[in-house]
Image: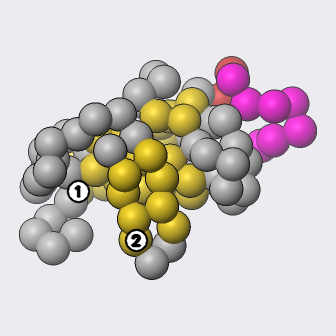
Amino acid sequence: SVTATAHGAAFSQSMAGNEPRMMIDTGDVAGVPVNGNSGVTNRFGVGVVSAGSSYRRSDISVDVAALPEDVDVSSSVISQVLTEGA
């Protein structure tokens, strides 16, 4: 699937047309595995993963063990709740 917004575009695993998804930006760091390899950031540091269900909390995580040694993260897990129009 392709997801495109004003913030960038990225390919992802096949997702249904209305399935909620989240776009992740790792600040130009490519190849970062997200949510246990369900997504990987592209050469621009952008990745897309399934966001579970609307109106329910979804945790998005970065595999810090797979990051290059010169990359640090401030938080490896982010929790979000998608709402209508998000």
Q: Is residue 67 magenta?
A: yes
Q: Position of residue 74 (x, y in %)?
A: 66, 50
First to last magenta residue range: 66-73
Check residue 18 in the rendering and tell me which mark sits there, or answer none: none
- The amino acid at mark 1 is Val
Badge 1 density bin: few <14, some 14–19, many ≥20, Cα 10 Å: some
Tally of marks: 2
Quadrant of the drawing holding the C terminus: bottom left
Q: Name the residue carrying label 1.
A: 81
Pick the front one: 79 or 24: 24
Nearer-N-terminus badge (1/2): 2
Q: Determine the CA span between mark 1 and mark 2.
A: 19 Å
Q: Is residue 14 magenta?
A: no
Q: Secondary structure at mark 2?
A: strand
Q: Position of residue 16 (x, y in %)?
A: 15, 42
- The amino acid at mark 2 is Thr
Q: Name the residue carrying label 2.
A: 5
- Residue 25 showing in the rendered view: yes
- In the figure, is residue 17 to the left or right of 43? left
Residue for point 77% across, 43% down: 72
Q: Position of residue 54 (x, y in %)?
A: 12, 53
Badge 2 density bin: few <14, some 14–19, many ≥20, Cα 10 Å: few
49 vs 17: above or below: above
